Amino acid sequence: MSIPLSDLTVRSEGVQKLYTDYLADRFSVNRRYQRKLVWTVEEKCDLIDSILSDLPIPLILVAEISGENGTSYELIDGMQRLNAIFSFIENEFDIDGQYFDLQALADTKSQLDDGKFTQKTPILPREKSRKIANYLLPMSIFKASNPEQVDKVFRRINSGGRRLSGQDLRQVGSTAKIAQLVRVIASEIRGDSSSSDIVPLRAMPKLSINNRHLAYGVDVDNIFWVQQAILRRIDVRSSLDEQLILDILVDCLVDPLVSSGTYTRDSVYGSVDANDAAPAALERRLSERIEIYGESNIREDFSLVYEELRAVLDVAGERFVKHVVDRSPGGRYPRYFQAVFLAFWELIIRSKMRVSSRQDAALKLRSIGTNRGPLNIPGGGGDWTAEDKRKNIDVVKGAIRDAFEFDPGSRRDTAQFGLASNLERILQNSVTEQSLFELKQGLLTLGAKREFDEGSWEKILCTITAIANAGPDCTGYLVIGVADDEKDVDRIRLLDGVEPVKSRSNRFDIVGIGREAEVRGESLKSYYDWVSDKLTGSDLAPDLRKRVASEISLVDYHGQAVILIKITPSPGPSFYKNVMYERIGSGIKAVEQADYMRLFQRFTTRT
């Protein structure tokens, strides 16, 4: 697939102009094939030193995209370099002990004057800061005719990249059904998920794992794999968590088991010789299984098992490796986790059982992987054979079977609603997609008289309408019971005596709605029904009102009950009391009648 020369432009752009575009979110990143921010502070300093030394730096390659808000650029090659330059400009790191002079650039001076930035010292000399601002970066811009063309260009450029791990290379631009499942599940567990594959470059630090001297949004020590000492920090940065999830998913979906190893992983991604019948058959078999099972059902079932296993580990009160293998943190133990997860999967999903006692399950897992225990999992590299894997999964199942009972209820309903991990995913997505999410501490005022807040409820209904108007492919959420203001948290402590539960990412305070039910003198169920009835009887547009009233659920997040309302769009824009609203960041605004056509076009034009 060649790119016509007429569609390709090579030009030089000043850092100053590119930074203005960056602040306006004209640079985007497609997370389906782009990596996290992985450069160390030393690598970033080397790039800045190259600029100050008048050395050339590699070309930035982007795909030009025209949309409702004008022209934007999807980064294909150069994300790490642009982030290094812009983060230095914003004083996130120094070079030789000196920080960029914020007065040297109009955009940074404006933000400095507005109090958004703070100048760190000592300051790099003004002439050197201006030299960086005026540096010309080579950019290659092409108009991609379709997403597949962008994928192919990205794969070609990065297939020889030294920083891409084996799993990164498999994921890059892969069209295999398993690739999307692996990426989405892995990001949800890490806590860097986003509601859209396309995110602004400016949001990438919030979705990347912190590094030495680089305080990105995801704390590596809070990630499940590192927290439980199943993988090391460097393993997660090298995407070995995604490789482990891939191995687990293949075992969940392919029966009988196949070996876990490089050959199998490459086979299911279609990355081996196309003339080799065996891997082609395995790829086809897995794709057909995903098609029949359904991607959303796989994700729900995976989350259900993961959530239950995590709950058992919480009861155990020890890290996975200490509790199961009785080893000190520092190594990696993915096969032990794989065996335990598959045992839970086969009991919960295939045998339609549930944990009857998490305490008993935790007790039965204690020391199961030590030299004294029945598990016998080979260490080192190489493949993990299907036979050895089957034997160890059965050992775990036999050990924990008495802590399970047959589930008379609907597993699918349980998987769809009530999972704490589902709430965590939604909260994480709100970090980068503020326009699709609204968080409320509750529906009662926090004054001396705890009354229903009519003004806040009216704003909620306007916000629901605005979120529904985001477009035909946009799904948003209203979460009631999560405080996003420290003053509200302090007030709730004082008034209700409630200590908030921190989310796993440590970014959100879950205060729940049980305290408001108590103030109203009713049960949690009655409070939930009251909110549901208020939605049903509201002045929302009929079609929108019907959908949100049917998409309300209650989530138990470690003892705090939270109301979750899913907001899906109508076939066209919605009005509230004859006013059309749209979301601007975390706020809303009424749309002028002369601007109605712009919103209608969102629902009639699909790219």
Image (tube, helix red, strand yellow):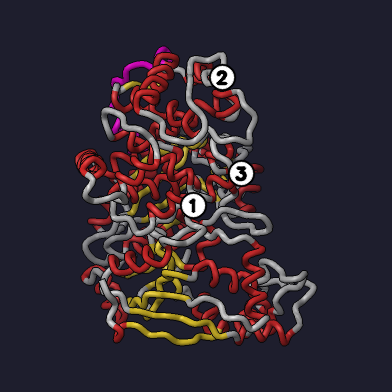
**For the residue marked with disc 1, what is the amino acid?**
Asp
**For the residue marked with disc 2, what is the amino acid?**
Thr
**For the residue marked with disc 3, what is the amino acid?**
Asp
- Real-space CA distance between mark 2 and mark 3, rounded to the nearest whole angstrom: 25 Å
Q: Quadrant of the N terminus?
A: bottom left
Considering the numbered disc 1 on the image, is that residue within a helix, a strand or a loop? loop
Q: Quadrant of the C terminus?
A: bottom left
Examine the image and state in which quarter residue 155 appears: bottom left
Examine the image and state in which quarter residue 457 appears: bottom left
Q: Of label 2 and label 3, which has the lower sequence position?
A: 3
Q: Which mark is residue 277?
A: none
Residue 196 in sight here: no
**Residue marked by disc 3:** 221
Residue 298 location (% of width, % of height) = 31, 39
Examine the image and state in which quarter residue 76 appears: bottom left
* Badge 3: residue crowd in 10 Å (few <14, some 14–19, many ≥20): some
Q: Is residue 518 above or below residue 567?
A: above
Give 415 or 449, whichever is nearer the viewer.
415
- Real-space CA distance between mark 2 and mark 1, rounded to the nearest whole angstrom: 33 Å
Does the residue at mark 2 contact the one at mark 1 (Cβ under 8 Å)?
A: no
Which residue is drawn at the image coordinates 80% and 73% (left, top)? Answer: 122
Q: Which mark is residue 192?
A: 1
Q: Is residue 120 above or below residue 287?
A: below
Callout count:
3
Which residue is drawn at the image coordinates 40% and 77% (left, top)? Answer: 72
Left or right of 107 in this view: 551: left
Left or right of 564 in this view: 380: right
Which residue is drawn at the image coordinates 73% and 85% (left, top)? Answer: 126
Magenta range is 401-417
**Residue marked by disc 2:** 370
